[in-house]
Image: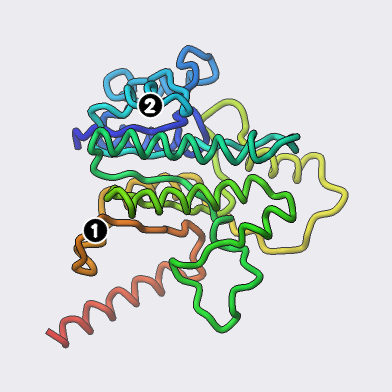
């Protein structure tokens, strides 16, 4: 594979693993960073074949021209950069929500201008899982979205920003004919390539080393960071445009929920065999 792709937020937790995966499969990668010379990104330069396959760009995602330079010549874009506020902020609409919306739109506009084949955007399971008003007897499908007002009233501005940014990305795709897929991972954990721990790893470290005064007794839906990277690559390479599936003149607008399965590998294998046998009988 000699295709060139761009990965935003290249030094991040998921992005670092994604870049390692893409390079190992022959991709040429443009990675965006605020400061490529910062020593905290040395792990990227030490990746196998990084010297030949990885080109780092200084880019501020709120600066359209710097994004355009990184995107130029790329067949696909992985928008993995994500603002995670470290604590409460005085003006969350301005300091959290607006930057997430604006950098996502800047990426999509740059992709439209450069006629990029496909854009894969990282969202969050938070954009899918919280809707107190969803009818209990209604199946959760790709139209399911978290309740924005619930996140606002509970001051969960990070989840709110991910929910509205994903909706805006899919809306932009529909209006502008851009091929966009959103990935919604749950709590991402696993080994780190970068030296400084990310937000989800810090949560685990604090839980194990320092403890909390109290922890809500609930199931944590955890996905391995390497599986998230695999998901990005798989959907980029394999998901067919919606026009191919539904025979409609439109580009794809898919939402992928990246979470652990409650089915074993053996069960999934059996279901695949049954599907093949059923299709064979029908034909």
| Closest to the observer, 199 or 77 | 77
| Closest to the observer, 135 or 37 | 135
Q: What element carries label 1?
A: loop
Q: Residue furthest left?
A: 283
Q: Residue 15 location in percent, x, y?
A: 45, 36
- Compared across the picture, whether 159 is left or right of 16 comes to right
Q: Distance between the residues labelled 2 and 1?
A: 26 Å
**Quadrant of the image containing the C terminus:** bottom left
* Mark 2, residue position: 67
Q: Residue furthest right?
A: 213
152 to 249, vertically: above or below: above
Instruction: Quadrant for residue 29, please give it.
Output: top left
* Mark 1, residue position: 250
163 to 19, vertically: above or below: below
Ranked by sequence position, the earlier of labels 2 and 1 is 2
Residue at 70%, 43% (x, y): give it: 203
Residue at 19%, 81% (x, y): give it: 279
Q: Are marks 2 and 1 in contact (CB under 8 Å)?
A: no
Label 1 packing within 10 angstroms: few (<14), some (14-19), many (20+): some
Residue 82's disc is none
Residue at 37%, 46% (x, y): give it: 120
| Closest to the observer, 84 or 22 | 84
Q: Residue 53 location in percent, x, y?
A: 28, 24
Q: Is mark 2 on a helix, strand or loop?
A: helix
Instruction: Quadrant for residue 68, please give it.
Output: top left
Specify the color scheme: rainbow
Residue at 24%, 58% (x, y): give it: 250
Count of numbered labels shown in the rendering: 2
Q: Residue 51 location in percent, x, y?
A: 31, 18
């Amino acid at each position: 594979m000699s295709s060139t792709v761009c990965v935003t937020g290249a030094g991040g937790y998921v992005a670092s693993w994604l870049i390692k995966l893409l390079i190992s499969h022959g991709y040429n990668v443009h990675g965006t960073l605020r400061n490529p010379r910062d020593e905290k990104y040395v792990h990227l330069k030490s990746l196998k074949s990084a010297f030949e396959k990885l080109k780092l760009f200084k880019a501020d995602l709120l600066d359209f021209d710097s994004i355009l330079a990184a995107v130029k010549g790329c067949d696909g874009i992985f928008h993995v950069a994500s603002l995670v506020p470290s604590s409460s902020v005085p003006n969350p609409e301005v300091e959290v929500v607006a930057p997430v919306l604006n950098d996502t739109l800047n990426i999509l506009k740059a992709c439209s201008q450069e006629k990029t084949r496909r854009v894969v955007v990282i969202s969050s399971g938070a954009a899918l899982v919280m809707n107190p008003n969803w009818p209990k007897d209604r199946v959760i499908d790709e139209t399911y979205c978290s309740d924005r007002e619930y996140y606002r009233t509970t001051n969960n501005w990070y989840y709110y920003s991910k929910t509205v940014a994903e909706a805006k990305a899919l809306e932009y795709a529909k209006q502008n004919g851009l091929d966009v897929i959103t990935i919604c991972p749950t709590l991402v954990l696993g080994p780190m390539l970068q030296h400084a721990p990310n937000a989800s790893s810090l949560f685990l470290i604090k839980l194990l080393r320092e403890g909390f005064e109290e922890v809500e007794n609930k199931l944590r839906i955890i996905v391995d960071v390497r599986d998230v990277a695999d998901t990005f690559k798989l959907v980029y390479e394999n998901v067919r445009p919606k026009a191919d599936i539904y025979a409609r003149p439109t580009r794809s607008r898919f939402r992928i929920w990246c979470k652990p399965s409650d089915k074993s590998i053996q069960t999934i294998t059996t279901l695949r065999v049954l599907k093949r046998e059923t299709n064979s009988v029908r034909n």
